[in-house]
Image (spheres, helix red, strand yellow):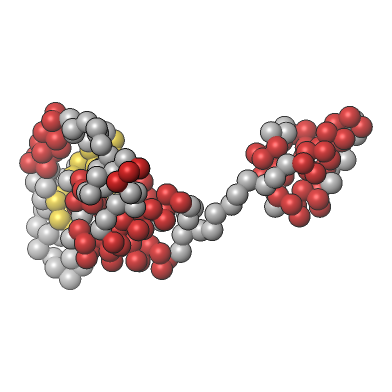
Amino acid sequence: MKQKIKNKFGTIRAFCQASGMNWFTVINTAAGRMTNPKIIAEIESAIENTMPIERFPAITDDDRATLKHSLESNFCGSLTGFCKKYPSWNINFVHAVIHGRRKKKDQKFERLKFELINDKPFCLPESGCNSTGKKRGRPKKNIAAVLAMAAIMIFTSCEKEDPNDSSGSNSGGQCNCGTIANDGIDGNCYWLEIRNECSGNKKTFCFDQDIWMNNHPGDRFCVTNVSSW
């Protein structure tokens, strides 16, 4: 039984996802710990009659490099610019694809790749898109959200640290630099969590989307409008 599942589905978990069978029941029956003839017959029947869920190949480093190059060439490296022109895309999803957090090369990835490389919508006008790729009838962006982001950009400024330049380093009593420990998006806040090099304390700051996109965990980073944290 275990070998049949492996040959057809790859793993017991994949078989259970496709068939709806209980994972605990299947794994214990396959291991011989459960010997109920009725359950064995049900599992054997499910193995025979269930089709595996389609598995997609993984996105490669070359794929990501192509997307980054297209973003630089067609949209000046700005995710905001791309998502503004093609508002059907979620900025979190695009960021996850480009920076390796999204692994699956599925149809959604292929559509994103097409639109980034060709700078035109994947869907045809009769399928619900106009010439800019914008879905008909899509509501306008929330003005309050735009103003909130503008306020974040005004009150928090930053720069990525040049390792060969000590002008923004933690010298002369200034402790405004550190290492990015984590990043993410919370509502309209594109945040970086930075560990201060002087104190070791971590603090989260909001930045504009383009700065957030171009700085990643492990990078050295300085926040220019604070002295320390």
Q: Position of residue 171 (x, y in %)?
A: 13, 59
The percent coordinates of residue 9 (x first, y second) are 70, 50
Image quarter in which the C terminus is found: top left
Q: Where residue 22 sits in the image (x, y, percent)?
A: 72, 32
Q: Is residue 225 above or below residue 141?
A: below
Q: Decide if residue 11 is on the left or right side of residue 200.
A: right
The quadrant holding residue 76 is: bottom left
Residue 220 seen anywhere in this rendered image of the structure: no
In the displayed structure, would residue 170 be above or below residue 187? Answer: below
Residue found 29% across the figure and 43% down from its top: 129
> In front: 74, or 14?
74
Q: Nearer the viewer, residue 204 or 40?
A: 40
Label tally: 0
Residue 153 visible in image: yes
Is residue 57 found left or right of 129 in the rendered image?
right
Please tell me which residue is depicted at 15% across the width and 55% down the height of the picture: 159
Which residue lies at the image location 22% right of the left edge and 36% below the top edge? 188
Q: Nearer the viewer, residue 39 or 195?
A: 39
Residue 223 versus residue 64: which sits nearer the camera? Answer: 64
Name above or below for residue 96 compared with residue 58: above
Residue sitting farthest toward the front: 126
From the top left corner, tell me how far across and down residue 218 is, in percent. 32, 57
- Please report the residue visible at 9 percent of the width from the left and 63 percent of the height from the top: 167
